[in-house]
Amino acid sequence: MTSVIESQGIASVFSNRTSRKSASRAQTARGAMADGEGYRHPTEVQMSQLVLPCHTNQRGELSVGQLLKWIDTTACLSAERHAGCPCVTASMDDIYFEHTISVGQVVNIKAKVNRAFNSSMEVGIQVASEDLCSEKQWTVCKALATFVAHRELSKVKLKQITPRTEEEKMEHSVAAERRRMRLLYADTIKDLLANCAIQDVPPSALPGSDLESRDCSCMVPAEKTRVESVELVLPPHANHQGNTFGGQIMAWMENVATIAASRLCRAHPTLKAIEMFHFRGPSQVGDRLVLKAIVNNAFKHSMEVGVCVEAYRQEAETHRRHINSAFMTFVVLDADDQPRTLPWIQPQPGDGERRYREASARKKIRLDRKYIVSCKQAEMPLSVPWDPSNQVYLSYNNVSSLKMLVAKDNWALSSEVNQVRLYTLEEDKFLSFHMEMSVHVDTTQAFLLLSDLLRRPEWDKHYRSVELVLQVDEDDAIYHVISPVLSGDTKPQDFVILASRRKPCDNRDPYVIAMRSVTLPTHPETPAYRRGETICSGFCFWREGDQLTKVSYYNQATPGFLNYVTTNVAGLSSEFYTTFKACEQFLLDNRSDLAPSLQTL
Ligand code: COA
Ligand code: ADP
């Protein structure tokens, strides 16, 4: 059941008047859809390649290294089309390979710029394979790369991307949140690795566990898998400015990683995933690149191989620059494409043991991230357990869910009273509503006032009391909220809510406060309250002028809560409207109440 609080907190009265605004919204939506037929994003670049024997690995499948080169080239051409100047690959987010591609099939790659920031851009890439004989198509992977535009002597300020379709608007909006996560990534992983409780138990001490099905007597020393290889960067490996192509480096990295993985299993492994990584510094034609790889840990059915790349000039061999590190997950498939059980790895003392433990921690982090970040909202449980190790991803999920809801095209104006508008959005699994009004208050002030949930009982009668459970960081906090007994209920409801707030990334972005339920061991359900849940709700604030802000409240209702929402939407109750008006009064009463933190925003 979703949040009574978050849905009841807003009220409405209905009228049949249709606002000009809504008509123009509908037109925009229709326009975008009509344009969608045959419409192509101006930065979209496509590449189609026929997979020939020269592109394949020992298994007769397209080598991932070759695929990475094609992906990088397509994405780079899209970035350069937008930037109008040379671009370099700055980073590549996690990639999960869903299918291998056979010789004779066609690879279709599509790339487009989702959003431009200052000098960097997020490029979204889709890879599909096509069987020419059967006309079947498969999604192979999706990737997100960041490219940075470079002009000699001057810093580049890229022009903004204007999203047109609903999908483009969502990608554009969520790209800002992904960028935040990317820039925090190295620190996040470092903190998580430092704090992750890793069970450092030798395999022989685990009788009756996963170990039983693995033969402990044939442990492979990690040393046996170590690979070192050197590459000389030649003109075909670089762009016209002499900078090595990111895709070429990724292909070399995949090559050494595959050798290390093969040395563990004495078979031909298949690359399943590459962890997010950052090109820390450039390399040029004439540089020597030393690539080192080793199996860090072997789990039952998968292994992690780590690769690092250093660059040096011939004349300064001792001065090596660490330009990249990546972690790749391999499996070994049998004749039926089922993963084979892998041998245990015996790490070297020192760094080897550290990497062995860190690989286990990375596996947990990777699974948490994959589940929370890529899980579709309809598949996600309403309340997810919060803990420090998934905080970054839950916060991302919280904000991006709200941004995706906001970016939907098919919001329909349901009613408008005293310049407060109520919109609804009907989808397969959800009914969502959104209230909107313009308030004579500074935008940052409105954002600050409403992001302090402790003050919500001042204007929202559905918030009887609020306790700050945990101030996670400057922008995220967890609250325990108690609502009064509702009609038809015997006891009050309580909620545990993660509130994540974001300042705009540029002047077209809104301020955002996103809320979703989480569970905390310190705040279990108790007989005194009925536990309520909110899946996605919150506020957006758009600056409409000096001291004028458009305030919008969004809420995605789930079935258990439908009755309350539909009663309001149908005009049988005016609580939405009353509460939103109280919110306006609260903002007006406190408009001069400059919070100390306001100066820093
Ligand atoms: N992921 C995504 N973007 C990143 C990033 C990361 N890990 N680190 C930095 N950036 C972005 C910044 O956000 C900034 O974007 P903005 O201008 O839109 O705000 C941009 O890169 C420049 O950041 P800045 O801090 O000025 O520079 P930097 O010293 O961090 O350099 C690179 C960033 C990418 C330019 C630099 O690391 C580099 O040259 N890397 C090698 C690139 C290359 O040659 N790739 C091909 C293979 S070698
Ligand atoms: P870390 O050691 O913290 O993992 P690095 O960036 O130094 O980070 O290395 C990344 C990965 O590259 C390591 O986890 C390891 O798998 C591999 N690696 C690093 N150094 C070597 C080496 N000398 N020989 C083989 N592999 C190496």
Image (tube, grey):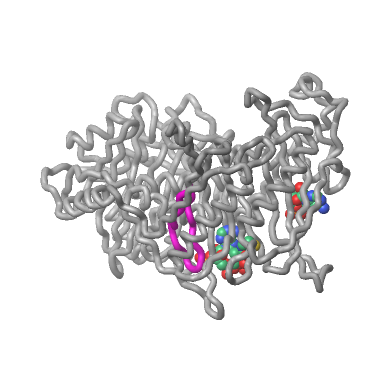
Q: Quadrant of the N terminus?
A: top left
The answer to which of 93 and 97 lies nearer the viewer is 97
Q: Is residue 482 above or below residue 206?
A: below
Residue 119 magenta-highlighted: yes
Q: Is residue 515 left or right of residue 200?
A: left
The answer to which of 208 and 70 lies nearer the viewer is 70
Q: Position of residue 139 (x, y in %)?
A: 48, 38
Residue 340 magenta-highlighted: no
Residue at 26%, 48% in the rendered image? 33
Q: Is residue 578 left or right of residue 177?
A: left
Q: Position of residue 317 (x, y in %)?
A: 82, 68
Q: Which residues are magenta?
A: 109-125
Residue at 78%, 45% in the rendered image? 294
Q: Position of residue 215 (x, y in %)?
A: 82, 23
Magenta segment, principal secondary structure? strand
Quarter of the image where ligand 1 sits: bottom right
